[in-house]
Amino acid sequence: MKIAIVGQGYVGLPLAMSATKTGHKVVGFDLNSSLVASLNRGESHIEDITNSELQGALESNLYSASSNPIDIAGSEIVVIAVPTPLNKDRGPDLNFVISASQIIGKNLASPALIINESTSHPGTLRHVIAPEVFKSSKAKVEHLFAVSPERVDPGNKTWNIKTTPRIFAGLTQKAASLTREFYSSFCDDLIEVSSPEVAETAKLFENTFRQVNIAIVNELALITRSIGISVNEVIDAASTKPYGFMRFNPGIGVGGHCIPVDPSYLAFSAKEAGIYPRFIELANEVNLEMPREIANRIKKENGASLKGKKVLVCGLSYKPNIADVRESPSITLISELEKEGAIVSWHDPLVKVWGESSTVEPAEGSFEITIVAVLHDSMDSTKILKSANYVFDCTGKTSASNKL
């Protein structure tokens, strides 16, 4: 079966590799021509896909990357796996989804199943993607449409595309049946829901749940600090309860492609329906303020001024053991420190280069302040602790005396 996957990022490329393993012939479409060229050389840009895995798919002629829309033609299934970021007002930005829909409509001359994996607000498949595809189709082809929101957790060695339960729904029962047939070839557990809107909303709620609970423990960290007890000890104690409690840990904030973004898509839908999402908005506010709170505390504990002080931020990515810096709160923290006049360097052996700056090593005594924002397995915590007299640990994973 010929499959086209639009978008070859953290969702699209793993999906493409999974599909090739069961014999599907996949075209990985992406408008980034330099990314396409590196993929066709067998160079993977994400941690979960090795170069050898990618090279094997290329050599078997089951995978090829392309930035030419005509290569989508003839596909029986097209999957949309493009980013759905926030705009400057922190509302939904569907430009990538709309562009993908238009490209599909223009280049598919025969009926196909079109599946959206990109996370978006309820109604996106029915009211945005399907109309855009039809409007862009010169022959006005009647395609089938379904949604199966991605559940990708980069770096997770236990839960992957095969093992993670997948929800899906079609605009018609035929679309749903074909979607089940496709995903069942490489996914273990499929759960059909009654409508695309249920599937779309479920994905948003999954990550809103995490956003809200992270906000609660981040607020708890501020409370426990003010009354002089350890937030980590409090959470450890609460975690001994065998029912009715789920552990979340405080940190510098939230980052990545889901938790900082998805709740805002759900909030958008709530407002469209005339409901003000107080809980969601407050959770967003708490987590977005954490880098500022941390910068203020570090300033207070270092003579009430950071001006001219050499500061090292360890961990630029948004989570341990990956190089993804999307929505990373570490970047916000660096900005807050620089506003206070600090001279900021950063250390991240996975990211290495960001903008016009590069990772630096945490040499002994080289900094006045070191902040552990994210701790990768490849980082040397002993060197980090020796890099400054004052070390602030946002992760709770080192022996630093200054912690959230």
Image: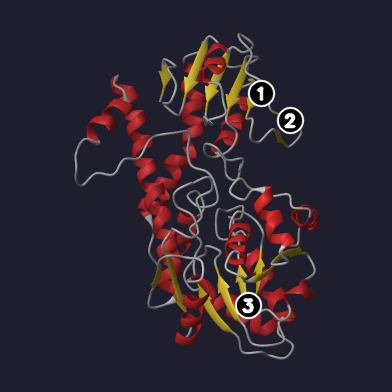
Please identify the quadrant where the N terminus is shown: bottom right
Labels 1 and 2 touching (C-beta < 8 A): yes
Tell me, yes or no, if residue 45 can be seen here: no
Direction from residue 260 to residue 359 in the image, left or right: right
Mark 3 to mark 2: distance in Å? 45 Å
For label 1, the SS is: strand
For label 3, the SS is: loop
For label 2, the SS is: strand
Residue sitting at x 70%, y 36%: 354
Instruction: Residue 345: give its label.
Output: 1
User: What x and y, as percent, mark residue 170?
Assistant: 47, 79
Q: Is residue 194 above or below residue 153?
A: below
Check disc 2: other Cα within 10 Å, few if <14, some if 14-19, many if 20+. few
Mark 1 to mark 2: distance in Å? 8 Å
User: What x and y, as percent, mark residue 92?
Assistant: 56, 60
Please give the residue where the numbered disc 3 appears in the rendered image: 1
User: What x and y, as percent, mark residue 17?
Assistant: 62, 60
User: What x and y, as percent, mark residue 349?
Assistant: 64, 30
Amino acid carrying label 3: it is Met
Dot 3 or dot 2: first in sequence order is 3
Please give the residue where the numbered disc 2 appears in the rendered image: 357
Amino acid carrying label 1: it is Ser
